[in-house]
Image (cartoon, grey):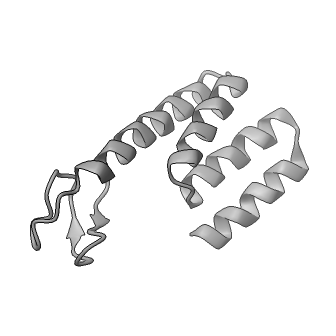
Amino acid sequence: MKQRRCPVCQAMQPPSAACRRCRADLSLVLAVLIPREQSLVAGRLAIQADDYAQAEAHLDSARKLGDDGEVRRLLAVVAVARGDFPAALAHHRAAMTLG
C-alpha cells in the first residue's frame, strides 16, 4: 500500500494505525483503505484472467471506497476489453480529472 497524507497534519504517512507526526488515530482510514486495496488487487487479477465481469465488480467496490484515477483507468481497460467504448472514454476522462 502506498504512502498517503495524514488527514490531520498532512504528513506523508505509510499505512499505520497512528500518524508518525501528530499521533492521530488512523485506524478508521485503514479500515477503508485495506478493503479498497484488496478490491484493486482482485480486479487486476480478474483482468489478467480475462474475467471482465468479475473485474468490474471488484473495481466498482474499490471505487465506492475511494474514487481516484487508478480505479478509473482500470475500469477504462475493462470497458475497452468489453467493447464499451463510450464507458471507456467516460472512465478515461474521470481518471484525467481525478489524477
Q: Residue at x 21, y 64 (%)?
A: 13
Residue 89 falls in image quadrant = bottom right
Coordinates of residue 1 in the picture (x, y in percent): 31, 48
The residue most toward the bottom is 9
77 left or right, relative to 13: right
Task: State whether residue 5 is above or below residue 85.
Answer: below
Closer to the camera in the image, 81 or 15? 15
Residue 58 falls in image quadrant = top right
Coordinates of residue 23 in the picture (x, y in percent): 10, 66
**Where is the C terminus found, in terms of image quarters?**
bottom right
Q: Residue at x 88, y 38 (%)?
A: 83
67 left or right, relative to 82: left
Q: Residue at x 67, y 21 (%)?
A: 51
Residue 95 falls in image quadrant = bottom right
Q: Residue at x 22, y 78 (%)?
A: 9
Closer to the camera in the image, 13 or 24? 24
Task: State whether residue 48 is above or below residue 15.
Answer: above
